[in-house]
Each structure stands twice: as C-alpha cells, then as structure tokens.
Amino acid sequence: MARILTLGTVLLVLVAFAEATAPKASNGLGNEGHSAMLHPSIDHASLTSAYALPTAATTRPLLEGAVHSSEFLEIADGRSRVTAFVSYPDRGERAPAVVVTTDAGMTDWARSMAFQAARAGFVAIAPDYPGQKRLAHEAGVRRFAAGLPAANGVTADVDIRGELISARVGAAPAATFALNDEGWATALAFVSHHTGNHFHPHPGMDHVAMEMRAQQAGGGGAAQREAPGLNVKPDDLPANWVMAGKTANTTPRTNEWIDVPMPGSNAKIHTWVVYPDGTQPAGTVLVLHGASGISDWIRSVADQLAKEGFIALAIDMSSGLGPNGGNFDSFRFTDDLMRATQKLTREDVMDRIMAVRDFAAKMPRSNGKTGSIGFCGGGTNSFTLATNSPAHNASVVYYGAAPMPLLEKTTAPVLGFYGEDDARIFSTVEPTRAAMKKLGKAYEAHTYPHATHSFLWMQDLGNNFQATADAWPRTIAFFRQHLATGATR
C-alpha cells in the first residue's frame, strides 16, 4: 500500500540531491538540431528551472530543447510490442533506469517528464501503455529497461495518476507526492536516493535558453588548444551550435538544393550540395544527420567539408515525409520530424542513402570516389554504408553504434569517434573493435574522456572542444587518404 510522504520527510534527501545535481557555472547551450526549430513565441526564461513540473506551455519546448540523446523504440514483450520513448543522460558510467508512466500513455507531457529524469542522470523510458494495458506490459518494460547497455540494472517506476506522483524503486513500497513543482522535484530526489544515483551534470547542461547565453566562452581548460568563445568559429573546424546558422547561410562557397531521384519510384531525396572552390574533380562525401534532421548545423558540416576540398551532399532523410509530402522545412517541430523518420525501415533508410551515393559518384565534378560521415543514428548509417556498397570508399562515424550483424560484410575502411560520457554508444566501442579485428576489417576508433554525445556540435560542454579539435583533423586526413584521385584502400 502506498504511503504519503511530506516534504519534511525527504528534506535531507532533496537537499543532498540538489547539491549533487546543481549545474556548475554554465558556458553555453544547445542541442544538435533539437532547439534549432524552437518556436519564437516561447518564453525561454520560463524554462530555466531544472526540475519544474512541465506544463501545457513548456512541454513541447522542453522536448525541442532536449540536450540528451533520445529515440523511439519498439519493445518486444512476448508476442506483442510496446512503443516507448527513451532519453539518455550524458554520463560515462551506467545509470539507473526510470520508467515514467501516466494514465494517458506516451503523451508529449509524459515524454517531457522522461526528458527531465534523464536530465537528472537516469536512463528514462516513457512507454505507451495507457490505463488497462499497463499490467500486461509493465514487467516486460522493466526487463527491457534493466537490460539497456546504458543502464546499471537498478530500475525505478514513476507513475502519475490524477493529482499524485507515485515513486517506487524495485519491489519496495511506493511513496506518493503531490503533482506540483515541489512534489516532482521531491519525487526525483526520492528515486535518486534509493537508486544510488549520484550525478553531476556537465557545466552548461541547461541548453534551453540558447540565445540568452550565446556570448559566453567555450570549455577550454588545461588543454593543448584553447577553446574560443561560442560566437567564434575556428577556420579549420566545423561550427558549433551557435555559429552553425551563420556558417551555413552566409558561406561563400557555391551551394544548392537538388532532388535526387529514387530508382524504381517517383520519390526524390532532397539534398543540400556544397561545392569546393575550383573546377578540378573531387571526392564526394555524404553527410548523414541523426534524429533531429538536416539542420543548419548539418549543413554547416557540409560547408566545412567543401572548404577542405570535397563535394559534400547532406541528405534530408525526411524527404517527402512532412505535411503534404514536404521535406525538413515543412515540420514545425523537430519532435514531429523524429516521429516521421522513425517510421522508415532500415531498408528504406539505406535505399535513400544508396540513391544519393550512386548519384554522387557520377556527378560531373566527382572523381568517382565516395565517403560518408554521420552523427548518432547517421553515424550508424555511415557505418552500415561501409557494409552495404562494395563501391563505397570510406565511412566516418561520430557517436553512432555499429551494425553488429553486418560487420562481416564491411568493405570500406571505417573511422569512429566517441565521447566516454555517452554510455549508450561508448559501451559498443570495444565489442566493435574486437569484432572488426577478428574479421580482419579496417576500423580505427578514438575515444575522448569527459566528452559527451554530440560533442562535435555541443563544443562547449566538458572536454567536447578538445575532442572536436582532435577528431576533425583526423576526419579530413582520412578522407584525403581514401577519396583522392588515385587513392587505394
């Protein structure tokens, strides 16, 4: 039977939790595309409280500004499947999991609660089983939560019914709290205490009010290369989240949108192309975005590749999936785009990428060689392309998991970069390295302590700038080695 806890009962826990999770001095904001489509009417100042209960006005902005890596998954539970939203914390060690449920299922509001739980250091799952379906699936979802690579096997439940929040860890009795700001923060404190969740967020982890802090300095520290301010773009590195729009939209390099036809259908893949200076033949590089789409930042990466001498093609994986058959710019919210592209099968995704790869190899200025670079899910797609096309020449992976069942089919060399404060992806690096070595495949992995997921974009967090300053020159050298005219594998 549930027992009611007052604030006084958990005061010491809440104080300890607040000290453990209070952000340090912030030096920036942002998320790889998630805040790029933030609606202009939103009052950013209203979102600065770390664990305020989401409201009708703040739910969607919280999801749009989510700094964490998130995804939609299908959880197998016997003969049925349960859709779930999973949000991961930026931390190196494995974390306890929290299953967040409401009587309405996987609503935007439930997912924004899961996002805040991830912000507090948990692997957070919001499953879609409203009302009567809960009892049939909750055991299967708990098993799934405990078995996630980023989870440590300790699982808590946070259930919201009516005006109460019920929190439980394992088989212990539930504690209940009022459904308000104080109750929500105290519930998080309760599950943090009972799961042993001791999490210290990276400085600058509150990335929602991004315009308000755009002039603050980057990470820096005692490193070999000093990090510039966020409003400075180094000439030899990709733009950060602040400078991405200016870089992509004011580039002096020739660029255009093209529609690449899909063989055997009437579909076309909307693609942003940036050309290097000159007229000489050049290698082509496909730029593969993650869940947040072909944002200004993705286009700025394409621009940087063109600056380095490559023809860069950034693929809009949401082509034709928007309202009225629109592309990326037809979605009002990035969250809607994520839901749309999540419906693509692996075969659909690779068909779209292969169509652009084959087109790129035959472009008038192409030297016939193709490379790819991808981020998060796009990183996985870049790795998969190395297993899918014998004609492909080089794949670069930024914080994307390897397609383990396909590794034996790898023909192109693969170069990977990973932040250690990204337990979900970092846990896959050593198994991938071992498997590729056993298979005799070309795979080189670089890992960075205190760097997060999306470090190339969020250059202001932790050691992300230092990771960027090391990874990007390696990326360019790799492409020059494998995509130059006359280059061999």
Image: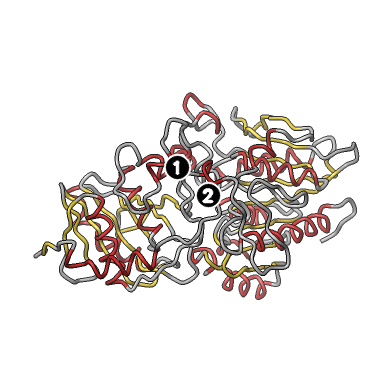
Residue 352 lies left or right of residue 131; in this view the side is right
Going by the picture, which residue comes out furthest to the top? 324
Q: Quadrant of residue 137?
A: bottom left
Mark 2 or mark 1: whose residue is earlier in sequence: 2
Q: Quadrant of the N terminus?
A: bottom left
Residue carrying label 2: 29
Give the amino acid type for the residue marked by disc 2 in the picture. Answer: Leu
* Image color mode: secondary structure
User: How many tags in the picture?
Assistant: 2
Q: Identify the residue shown where x is 25% and y is 62%.
A: 157
Asked which secondary structure carries label 1, the reply is helix
Image coordinates for residue 372, horizontal then vertical, percent: 70, 50
Image coordinates for residue 288, horizontal then vertical, percent: 63, 46
Residue 219 lies left or right of residue 369; in this view the side is left
Asked which secondary structure carries label 2, the reply is loop
Give residue 64's mark.
1
Residue 425 lies left or right of residue 464; in this view the side is left
Query: In the image, is residue 429 above or below residue 128?
Result: below
Image coordinates for residue 382, horizontal then vertical, percent: 64, 53
Q: Quadrant of the C terminus?
A: bottom right
Q: Nearer the viewer, residue 241 or 48?
A: 48
Q: Identify the residue shown where x is 36% and y is 50%.
A: 49
